Image (tube, helix red, strand yellow):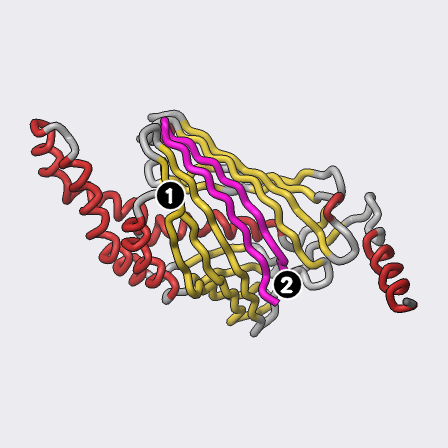
Protein backbone atom coordinates (compact mmCIF):
# COMPACT_ATOMS: atom_id res chain seq x y z
CA UNK A 1 0.00 0.00 0.00
CA UNK A 2 2.83 2.41 0.86
CA UNK A 3 4.40 1.80 -2.56
CA UNK A 4 1.07 2.58 -4.25
CA UNK A 5 0.66 5.82 -2.31
CA UNK A 6 4.25 6.86 -3.09
CA UNK A 7 3.76 6.09 -6.77
CA UNK A 8 0.55 8.09 -6.89
CA UNK A 9 2.18 11.00 -5.08
CA UNK A 10 5.17 11.17 -7.40
CA UNK A 11 2.92 10.73 -10.43
CA UNK A 12 0.89 13.76 -9.36
CA UNK A 13 4.03 15.79 -8.68
CA UNK A 14 5.38 15.01 -12.16
CA UNK A 15 2.13 16.08 -13.81
CA UNK A 16 2.14 19.51 -12.13
CA UNK A 17 5.90 20.12 -12.40
CA UNK A 18 5.36 22.22 -15.53
CA UNK A 19 4.12 25.72 -14.77
CA UNK A 20 2.12 27.49 -17.46
CA UNK A 21 4.63 30.34 -17.65
CA UNK A 22 7.73 28.12 -17.91
CA UNK A 23 10.01 28.27 -20.94
CA UNK A 24 10.52 24.89 -22.58
CA UNK A 25 13.80 24.17 -24.37
CA UNK A 26 14.06 21.48 -27.08
CA UNK A 27 17.63 20.13 -26.76
CA UNK A 28 19.51 18.72 -29.75
CA UNK A 29 19.06 14.94 -29.40
CA UNK A 30 21.84 13.52 -31.57
CA UNK A 31 25.32 12.20 -30.80
CA UNK A 32 27.79 10.27 -32.92
CA UNK A 33 26.75 6.62 -33.17
CA UNK A 34 23.22 7.14 -31.86
CA UNK A 35 20.41 5.18 -33.48
CA UNK A 36 16.68 5.76 -33.12
CA UNK A 37 13.85 3.81 -34.74
CA UNK A 38 10.25 4.82 -35.33
CA UNK A 39 7.22 2.77 -36.31
CA UNK A 40 5.08 4.72 -38.74
CA UNK A 41 1.74 4.47 -40.51
CA UNK A 42 0.22 6.68 -43.24
CA UNK A 43 -3.37 6.33 -44.46
CA UNK A 44 -4.12 8.12 -47.73
CA UNK A 45 -7.61 8.70 -49.10
CA UNK A 46 -8.12 9.95 -52.66
CA UNK A 47 -11.20 11.02 -54.62
CA UNK A 48 -11.60 12.80 -57.94
CA UNK A 49 -15.34 13.24 -58.30
CA UNK A 50 -15.67 9.87 -60.06
CA UNK A 51 -13.86 7.28 -57.96
CA UNK A 52 -12.48 6.85 -54.45
CA UNK A 53 -9.54 4.85 -53.14
CA UNK A 54 -7.56 4.56 -49.94
CA UNK A 55 -4.43 2.76 -48.85
CA UNK A 56 -2.16 2.33 -45.85
CA UNK A 57 1.64 2.41 -45.81
CA UNK A 58 3.52 1.06 -42.78
CA UNK A 59 7.25 1.21 -42.18
CA UNK A 60 10.02 1.31 -39.61
CA UNK A 61 12.26 4.34 -40.06
CA UNK A 62 15.76 4.22 -38.57
CA UNK A 63 17.89 7.32 -37.95
CA UNK A 64 21.65 6.75 -37.56
CA UNK A 65 24.17 9.49 -36.78
CA UNK A 66 27.24 8.50 -38.78
CA UNK A 67 29.14 11.80 -38.52
CA UNK A 68 29.45 14.58 -35.96
CA UNK A 69 31.59 17.72 -35.65
CA UNK A 70 31.38 21.21 -34.21
CA UNK A 71 29.45 22.27 -37.31
CA UNK A 72 26.76 19.59 -37.11
CA UNK A 73 25.77 16.01 -37.85
CA UNK A 74 25.38 13.57 -40.74
CA UNK A 75 22.38 11.25 -40.49
CA UNK A 76 21.44 8.21 -42.57
CA UNK A 77 17.69 7.63 -42.73
CA UNK A 78 16.69 4.10 -43.66
CA UNK A 79 13.23 2.58 -44.03
CA UNK A 80 12.73 -1.08 -43.22
CA UNK A 81 9.89 -3.47 -44.00
CA UNK A 82 7.75 -0.90 -45.80
CA UNK A 83 4.40 -2.28 -46.92
CA UNK A 84 1.42 -0.89 -48.80
CA UNK A 85 -2.10 -2.30 -48.59
CA UNK A 86 -5.27 -1.12 -50.28
CA UNK A 87 -8.15 -0.30 -47.96
CA UNK A 88 -10.50 0.65 -50.77
CA UNK A 89 -9.73 0.18 -54.44
CA UNK A 90 -7.97 -2.22 -56.78
CA UNK A 91 -5.48 -4.47 -54.88
CA UNK A 92 -3.40 -4.66 -58.07
CA UNK A 93 -2.38 -1.07 -57.44
CA UNK A 94 -0.67 -2.02 -54.18
CA UNK A 95 0.95 -5.04 -55.80
CA UNK A 96 2.41 -2.80 -58.51
CA UNK A 97 3.82 -0.31 -55.97
CA UNK A 98 5.28 -2.78 -53.47
CA UNK A 99 8.52 -3.39 -55.46
CA UNK A 100 9.13 0.37 -55.43
CA UNK A 101 8.91 0.45 -51.64
CA UNK A 102 11.38 -2.43 -51.49
CA UNK A 103 13.82 -0.44 -53.63
CA UNK A 104 13.43 2.64 -51.42
CA UNK A 105 14.07 0.54 -48.30
CA UNK A 106 17.43 -0.47 -49.73
CA UNK A 107 18.58 3.12 -50.37
CA UNK A 108 19.04 5.39 -47.30
CA UNK A 109 18.62 9.14 -47.50
CA UNK A 110 21.55 11.23 -46.26
CA UNK A 111 20.55 14.24 -44.16
CA UNK A 112 22.97 16.98 -43.12
CA UNK A 113 22.11 18.83 -39.89
CA UNK A 114 23.77 21.91 -38.44
CA UNK A 115 24.91 22.19 -34.82
CA UNK A 116 21.44 23.38 -33.76
CA UNK A 117 19.88 20.21 -35.21
CA UNK A 118 18.31 21.77 -38.29
CA UNK A 119 18.50 20.32 -41.79
CA UNK A 120 20.92 22.09 -44.12
CA UNK A 121 21.17 19.41 -46.81
CA UNK A 122 19.40 16.26 -48.04
CA UNK A 123 20.65 13.79 -50.64
CA UNK A 124 19.06 10.87 -52.49
CA UNK A 125 21.18 8.32 -54.35
CA UNK A 126 20.73 9.00 -58.11
CA UNK A 127 20.68 5.25 -58.73
CA UNK A 128 17.45 5.03 -56.71
CA UNK A 129 15.78 7.37 -59.20
CA UNK A 130 16.88 5.15 -62.10
CA UNK A 131 15.62 1.98 -60.42
CA UNK A 132 12.30 3.48 -59.30
CA UNK A 133 11.54 4.79 -62.79
CA UNK A 134 12.32 1.37 -64.21
CA UNK A 135 10.11 -0.39 -61.64
CA UNK A 136 7.24 2.08 -61.96
CA UNK A 137 7.09 2.31 -65.73
CA UNK A 138 5.16 -0.93 -66.51
CA UNK A 139 2.42 -0.15 -63.99
CA UNK A 140 2.03 3.43 -65.21
CA UNK A 141 1.90 2.26 -68.83
CA UNK A 142 -0.81 -0.24 -67.92
CA UNK A 143 -2.92 2.40 -66.18
CA UNK A 144 -2.58 4.86 -69.06
CA UNK A 145 -3.37 2.16 -71.62
CA UNK A 146 -6.57 1.31 -69.74
CA UNK A 147 -7.56 4.98 -69.58
CA UNK A 148 -6.97 5.44 -73.30
CA UNK A 149 -8.92 2.28 -74.15
CA UNK A 150 -11.86 3.69 -72.16
CA UNK A 151 -12.02 6.77 -74.41
CA UNK A 152 -14.30 6.99 -77.47
CA UNK A 153 -12.62 5.24 -80.40
CA UNK A 154 -12.06 8.44 -82.40
CA UNK A 155 -10.07 9.96 -79.49
CA UNK A 156 -7.69 7.10 -78.81
CA UNK A 157 -5.11 7.49 -81.61
CA UNK A 158 -3.76 10.94 -80.54
CA UNK A 159 -3.31 9.78 -76.94
CA UNK A 160 -1.64 6.54 -78.01
CA UNK A 161 0.80 8.53 -80.13
CA UNK A 162 1.96 10.57 -77.15
CA UNK A 163 1.65 7.93 -74.42
CA UNK A 164 5.38 7.12 -74.25
CA UNK A 165 6.28 10.79 -73.85
CA UNK A 166 3.61 11.27 -71.19
CA UNK A 167 4.84 8.27 -69.21
CA UNK A 168 8.40 9.58 -69.21
CA UNK A 169 7.20 13.04 -68.20
CA UNK A 170 5.17 11.74 -65.25
CA UNK A 171 8.02 9.50 -64.07
CA UNK A 172 10.47 12.38 -64.22
CA UNK A 173 8.10 14.80 -62.46
CA UNK A 174 7.69 12.42 -59.52
CA UNK A 175 10.82 10.23 -59.40
CA UNK A 176 13.70 12.42 -60.51
CA UNK A 177 16.38 13.06 -57.88
CA UNK A 178 15.23 16.68 -57.60
CA UNK A 179 11.58 15.67 -57.11
CA UNK A 180 12.34 13.05 -54.46
CA UNK A 181 14.67 15.36 -52.55
CA UNK A 182 12.08 18.17 -52.60
CA UNK A 183 9.38 15.81 -51.31
CA UNK A 184 11.56 14.49 -48.47
CA UNK A 185 12.66 17.98 -47.50
CA UNK A 186 9.03 18.72 -46.59
CA UNK A 187 9.31 16.48 -43.52
CA UNK A 188 12.89 17.40 -42.63
CA UNK A 189 11.99 21.10 -42.68
CA UNK A 190 10.47 20.29 -39.29
CA UNK A 191 13.97 19.97 -37.81
CA UNK A 192 13.76 23.78 -37.62
CA UNK A 193 11.73 23.20 -34.45
CA UNK A 194 14.71 21.59 -32.67
CA UNK A 195 17.12 23.63 -30.54
CA UNK A 196 14.56 26.33 -29.76
CA UNK A 197 12.92 27.72 -26.63
CA UNK A 198 9.14 27.80 -26.35
CA UNK A 199 6.83 29.92 -24.23
CA UNK A 200 3.06 29.40 -23.91
CA UNK A 201 1.15 31.66 -26.30
CA UNK A 202 4.17 32.38 -28.49
CA UNK A 203 3.90 31.48 -32.20
CA UNK A 204 7.13 31.14 -34.16
CA UNK A 205 7.63 31.08 -37.94
CA UNK A 206 10.31 29.75 -40.32
CA UNK A 207 10.41 29.29 -44.12
CA UNK A 208 9.23 25.95 -45.51
CA UNK A 209 7.88 24.56 -48.78
CA UNK A 210 5.65 21.94 -50.36
CA UNK A 211 6.48 20.10 -53.56
CA UNK A 212 3.85 19.42 -56.23
CA UNK A 213 4.69 17.61 -59.46
CA UNK A 214 2.70 20.15 -61.51
CA UNK A 215 3.41 23.35 -59.55
CA UNK A 216 6.95 22.62 -58.39
CA UNK A 217 8.31 23.91 -55.07
CA UNK A 218 5.78 26.19 -53.39
CA UNK A 219 6.52 28.37 -50.33
CA UNK A 220 4.59 27.24 -47.25
CA UNK A 221 5.60 29.21 -44.13
CA UNK A 222 5.79 26.94 -41.08
CA UNK A 223 4.09 28.20 -37.89
CA UNK A 224 4.62 26.36 -34.60
CA UNK A 225 3.88 26.76 -30.91
CA UNK A 226 3.92 24.96 -27.55
CA UNK A 227 0.77 23.17 -26.39
CA UNK A 228 0.88 23.73 -22.61
CA UNK A 229 -2.11 21.44 -22.03
CA UNK A 230 -0.01 18.48 -23.23
CA UNK A 231 3.31 19.44 -21.67
CA UNK A 232 4.69 18.30 -18.32
CA UNK A 233 8.06 17.82 -16.63
CA UNK A 234 8.92 14.87 -18.91
CA UNK A 235 7.31 15.47 -22.31
CA UNK A 236 6.48 18.56 -24.36
CA UNK A 237 4.11 18.88 -27.32
CA UNK A 238 4.66 21.25 -30.24
CA UNK A 239 1.86 21.93 -32.70
CA UNK A 240 2.49 23.23 -36.21
CA UNK A 241 0.71 24.32 -39.36
CA UNK A 242 1.74 25.25 -42.90
CA UNK A 243 -0.20 25.85 -46.10
CA UNK A 244 0.28 26.75 -49.76
CA UNK A 245 -2.13 27.79 -52.48
CA UNK A 246 -1.85 28.54 -56.20
CA UNK A 247 -4.40 29.26 -58.91
CA UNK A 248 -4.06 27.56 -62.29
CA UNK A 249 -1.42 29.37 -64.31
CA UNK A 250 -0.01 31.20 -61.29
CA UNK A 251 3.78 31.03 -60.88
CA UNK A 252 4.00 28.47 -63.67
CA UNK A 253 1.48 26.11 -62.05
CA UNK A 254 -0.11 24.11 -64.85
CA UNK A 255 -2.47 22.15 -62.56
CA UNK A 256 -6.03 23.14 -61.64
CA UNK A 257 -6.31 25.37 -58.56
CA UNK A 258 -4.05 23.84 -55.91
CA UNK A 259 -4.19 24.08 -52.12
CA UNK A 260 -2.41 22.04 -49.45
CA UNK A 261 -2.73 22.34 -45.67
CA UNK A 262 -0.69 20.37 -43.14
CA UNK A 263 -1.24 20.34 -39.38
CA UNK A 264 0.56 18.19 -36.86
CA UNK A 265 1.80 17.50 -33.35
CA UNK A 266 5.29 16.49 -32.23
CA UNK A 267 5.97 15.14 -28.74
CA UNK A 268 9.56 15.19 -27.51
CA UNK A 269 11.42 14.16 -24.37
CA UNK A 270 12.48 17.32 -22.54
CA UNK A 271 15.62 15.71 -21.13
CA UNK A 272 16.99 14.00 -24.26
CA UNK A 273 15.34 15.97 -27.07
CA UNK A 274 14.30 12.73 -28.77
CA UNK A 275 10.99 12.77 -30.59
CA UNK A 276 8.64 10.29 -28.92
CA UNK A 277 5.69 10.49 -31.32
CA UNK A 278 4.22 12.52 -34.18
CA UNK A 279 0.81 12.97 -35.78
CA UNK A 280 0.06 14.78 -39.02
CA UNK A 281 -2.95 15.61 -41.13
CA UNK A 282 -2.55 16.78 -44.74
CA UNK A 283 -5.37 17.86 -47.04
CA UNK A 284 -4.61 18.55 -50.70
CA UNK A 285 -7.15 19.80 -53.25
CA UNK A 286 -6.37 20.15 -56.94
CA UNK A 287 -9.38 21.01 -59.07
CA UNK A 288 -12.08 18.47 -58.18
CA UNK A 289 -9.53 16.00 -56.78
CA UNK A 290 -8.89 15.75 -53.04
CA UNK A 291 -6.30 13.77 -51.09
CA UNK A 292 -6.20 13.44 -47.32
CA UNK A 293 -3.31 11.89 -45.41
CA UNK A 294 -3.30 10.90 -41.73
CA UNK A 295 0.01 9.76 -40.32
CA UNK A 296 1.45 8.65 -37.00
CA UNK A 297 4.89 7.64 -35.76
CA UNK A 298 6.05 6.33 -32.40
CA UNK A 299 9.57 5.76 -31.16
CA UNK A 300 10.50 2.12 -30.63
CA UNK A 301 11.77 1.50 -27.11
Residue 178 in the image: state x and y as whole percent.
35, 50
Q: Position of residue 74 (x, y in %)?
A: 51, 66
Residue at point 39%, 64% (across, down): 105
Position of residue 26 in the picture relative to residue 214 (left or right): right
Give the percent coordinates (x, y) of residue 31: 61, 69
The residue at which mark 2 appears reads as 29
Q: Residue furthest front?
A: 1
Q: How far apart in space, not on screen, are marks 2 and 1 (Cα)?
A: 39 Å
Magenta residue check for 248: no
Which of the two marks, 2 or 1, is nearer to us in this view?
Answer: 1
Whether residue 190 sits left or right of residue 7 in the image: it is left
Quarter of the image for residue 297 reads bottom right
Give, as a single range, the part of the protein colored magenta: 274-301
The answer to which of 149 and 248 lies nearer the viewer is 149
Q: Which residue is mark 1?
A: 88
Q: Residue at x 37, y 31 (%)?
A: 289
Amino acid sequence: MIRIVVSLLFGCLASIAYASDDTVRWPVPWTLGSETAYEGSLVTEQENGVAKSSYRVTTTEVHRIVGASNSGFEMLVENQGSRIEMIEGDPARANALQPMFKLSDASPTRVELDATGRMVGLHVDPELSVQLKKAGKPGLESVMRSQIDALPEDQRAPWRAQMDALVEKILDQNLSVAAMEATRREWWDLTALVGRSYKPGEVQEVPSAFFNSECGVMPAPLYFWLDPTRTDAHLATIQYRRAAKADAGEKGCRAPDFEQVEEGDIVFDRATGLVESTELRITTTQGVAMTTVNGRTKRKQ
